[in-house]
Amino acid sequence: MGNQLKTAVLLAALSSLLIAISYWIIGGSVGLIIGIGIAAITNLVSWYQSDKIALAAYGAQPVSPSDAPGLYSMVERLSARANIPTPRVYIVPSSNANAFATGRDPENAAVAVTEGILHILPEEELEGVIAHELTHIVNRDTLTQAVSATIAGAISFLAQMVSYSLWFGGGNSRDGDRGGNPLGILLTVTLAPLAASVIQLAISRTREFSADAGAAKLTGNPRALAKALQRLDATARQMPMEANPAFEPLLIINPFSGNFMGNLFRTHPSTEARVEALLKIEQQFASTVY
C-alpha cells in the first residue's frame, strides 16, 4: 500500500509539473490547453502502442510453446498461479542477461527475456525473474511506466519548444494571462525536464520493490530471486547492455555498470537494497511457518 501511494503521489507530481510548465512558459490558458493536448495525444499512442514499441526497440522475437517449451511452460504455470492470461512470450537475441514485461493490461501483455539470461540463470532463479515480470503485469506497472515516460517526454518536448522560441525572440504570453519572466522561463526550460526525469525514475524504483515482493509471494522462494538479482547485477557490470534510455525502467536490472550518475538517476533501486528486502520477506515466511 505504501508503494502504491508513493507511485500515485509521484505520478500526480509529474502531471502537475506538465500543467505548470505549460501554463508558465507557453502562456496562460493557451499553454495549458496545448500541454494537455500534447499529453492526451502521446498517452493515447502509448496506451495502444507501448508494447510494440518496446519489443521492437530490443529486437524481441515471438516464440511459441514448440520453440521454447521450458520457458513457455514456466510462464504459463506462473501466469495461472497469478490468475492472469498467459502473456505473449518473446526472446531477445542478445548475450546480455535481462528481462522485461510490457503491455497496457494483462489481456494485452508480453514477457521478454534475453538469450543470455536463459543461459546464465538456473531454473528456480529464472522462475523468480519471470514471476517478477508477471507481477509488473498484475500491478499494471507496465502501463504506469508508459504513462510516466509519456508525460516526462511531453515536458521535455515543451521545454525544447520554448527554448527554440526564446532563440527566435519569443517568451511573452499571447493571451495576456501571464507576462514572460525571462529568468523564470530560462530556469523552467532548464530544470523542468530534469525534474521530470528524476520523478520518472523514482516511480520506476518504487515499482521494482513491489514487483520483487509480488514475485516472492508468487513463487514462495524469495531467496531464488535475490540470487538471480545478484547474478544479473554482476553480469551487467562485466557486460553492460546497450539499451534505449526510454525503456531502461522496463528491465529487471539496471543495464549499465557503475554508479557514475549516482542513485538519483538510477532506473532501479540498488541490488543490495532489493536483496535485503527479499531476505526480510523470507524471514517473514519462515516466522509464519513456525
Image: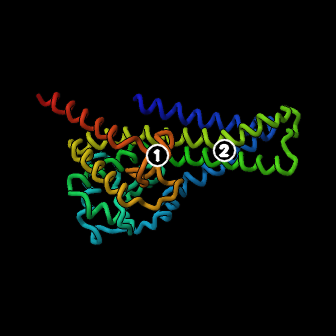
Tell which of 90 and 270 is nearer to you: 270
Q: Residue furthest bottom?
A: 67
Q: How many residues crowd around disc 1 within 10 Å: few (fewer than 14), some, or many (20 or more)? A: many
**Which circle, 2 or 1, is nearer the viewer?**
1
Q: Residue at horizontal 24%, vertical 52%?
A: 125
Quadrant of the image containing the N terminus: top left
Q: Does label 2 or label 1 sit earlier along the sequence?
A: 2
Does residue 283 appear left or right of residue 45 in this picture?
Answer: left
For the residue marked with disc 1, what is the amino acid? Thr
| Rendered residue at 66%/47% (across/down) | 156
Q: Say if residue 7 shows up in the picture.
A: yes
Q: Check disc 1 and report the residue beneath it.
A: 267
Hey, which quadrant is residue 179 in on the image? top right
Q: Secondary structure at mark 2?
A: helix
Task: Read off the residue under disc 2.
Answer: 155
Quarter of the image with the C terminus is top left
Quarter of the rendering containing residue 22: top right
Q: Are marks 2 and 1 in contact (CB under 8 Å)?
A: no
Residue 49 position in % (x across, y down): 54, 58
Residue 24 drawn at (x, y percent): 76, 35
Q: Position of residue 59 (x, y in %)?
A: 45, 67
Label 2 and label 1: CA atoms lie apart by 19 Å
